[in-house]
Image: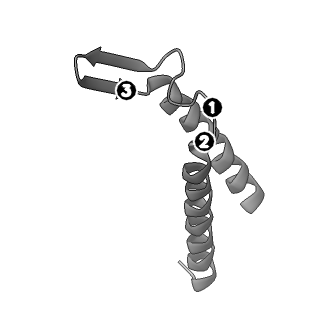
């Protein structure tokens, strides 16, 4: 692996963390995120269990699209 290729990987990893960080900052501002119809929420007394299944799938699809676009533009 050459230094140039190694540098490209570092830039790509940095962009990934940048996009991931921006998503985390903005995720609290999106209304309804974490309360989608497919999210599992169990409330029993003072115990609350929240498993954001639909939200996780949605974020996974978005990140997959972003990473695919970045990798296609990279080449």
Depth check, mark 2 against mark 3: the one in front is 3
> Taking 2 as reference, is 45 left or right?
left
Give the answer, above or below, for where 18 lies relative to 3: above
Q: Residue at x 73, y 62 (%)?
A: 74
Task: Indicate the position of residue 53 as horizontal and vertical percent values.
Answer: 44, 25
Q: Earlier in the sequence, mark 1 or mark 3?
A: 1
Residue picked out by circle 3 = 51
Q: Residue at x 62, y 48 (%)?
A: 26
Task: Indicate the position of residue 35 as horizontal and vertical percent values.
Answer: 51, 24
Q: Residue at x 63, y 37 (%)?
A: 30
Give the answer, above or below, for where 69 lies relative to 32: below
Q: Nearer the viewer, residue 72 or 27?
A: 27
User: Circle 3 sits in a helix, a strand or a loop, which is it?
Assistant: strand
Distance CA(mark 1)–CA(mark 3): 17 Å
Give the answer, above or below, for where 70 lies relative to 8: above
Q: Residue furthest front?
A: 46
Q: Evaluate if marks 1 and 2 touch, with contact meaning CB atoms under 8 Å apart.
A: no
Q: Earlier in the sequence, mark 1 or mark 2?
A: 1
> Taking 46 as reference, is 69 left or right?
right
Distance CA(mark 1)–CA(mark 2): 22 Å
Task: Indicate the position of residue 46 as horizontal and vertical percent values.
Answer: 23, 23
> Taking 31 as reference, is 45 left or right?
left
- Residue 35, can we see it? yes
Q: Residue furthest bottom?
A: 3
Residue picked out by circle 2 = 64
Q: Residue at x 60, y 34 (%)?
A: 61
User: Circle 2 sits in a helix, a strand or a loop, which is it?
Assistant: helix
Q: Which mark is residue 31?
A: 1
């Amino acid at each position: 692996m050459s230094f140039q290729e190694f540098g490209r990987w570092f830039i790509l990893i940095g962009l990934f963390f940048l996009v991931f960080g921006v998503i985390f900052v903005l995720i609290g501002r999106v209304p309804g995120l974490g309360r989608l119809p497919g999210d599992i929420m169990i409330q029993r007394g003072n115990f609350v269990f929240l498993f954001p299944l639909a939200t996780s799938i949605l974020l996974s699809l978005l990140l997959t699209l972003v990473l695919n676009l970045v990798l296609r533009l990279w080449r």
